[in-house]
Amino acid sequence: MRVLITGGAGFIGSNAARRFRELGHDVVLFDNLSRPAARYNLRWLQSLHPQVRFVQGDVRNEDDLSIIGQEPFDAILHLAAQVAAGSASRSASRATSEA
């Protein structure tokens, strides 16, 4: 099975990717690496499973999504999200004030 994990360099995504690889599945991670710990998670995962493919991009950017949009996947685990509620609130405030 070929699996795409958005937010794949986060804590849950990197651990899910590790497990999918242990089960013999092909894994592609998609993450914007906006959180400092994401780089550590990615290095840890790739040290265990160098076959895991990483694509840096943001799910909010259509051009970034087109990088992986043409590839066939059997499953998508969508974990990309803003972590802190405060930053989500500020983003929502900006978006409504710009509208």
Image (tube, rainbow, N blue to C red):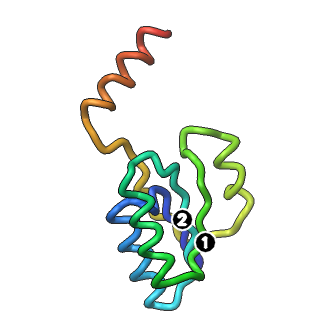
Image quarter of residue 94:
top left
Q: Secondary structure at mark 1?
A: strand
Tell me the distance, in whole angstroms, between the alpha carbons under discs 2 and 1.
6 Å
Q: Quadrant of residue 91?
A: top left
Q: Of all residues shown, which one is farthest toward the right? A: 70
Res. 39 visible in picture:
yes
For this view, does 94 lie left or right of residue 68?
left
Q: Which disc number belongs to residue 61?
A: none
State whether residue 1 appears in this view. Answer: no
> In x, y percent, where is residue 16?
38, 73
Residue at coordinates 74% horizontally, 59% vertically from top-left? 70
In the depicted structure, whether residue 87 falls above or below residue 11? above
Rendering coords of residue 95 (x, y %): 44, 18
Check the picture and name the quadrant holding the N terminus.
bottom right
Q: Earlier in the sequence, mark 2 or mark 1?
A: 2
Q: Residues within 10 Å of mark 2 (few under 14, many from 20)?
A: many
**Looking at this view, is 23 or 32 the one in front?**
32
The crowd level at tag 1 (other Cα within 10 Å; few <14, some 14-19, many 20+) is few
Instruction: Report if the CB atoms under discs 2 and 1 are less than 8 Å apart.
Output: yes
Q: Nearer the viewer, residue 34 or 92?
A: 34
The amino acid sitting under disc 2 is Leu
Name the residue that disc number 2 marks: 29
Residue sitting at x 53%, y 70%:
75
Residue shown at the point (44%, 75%) measured from the top left: 45
Percent across and percent down for residue 21 are 48, 84
Residue beneath the point at 61% across and 39% down:
61
Q: Which mark is residue 53?
A: 1
Tally the marks: 2
Task: Determine the secondary structure under disc 2.
Answer: strand
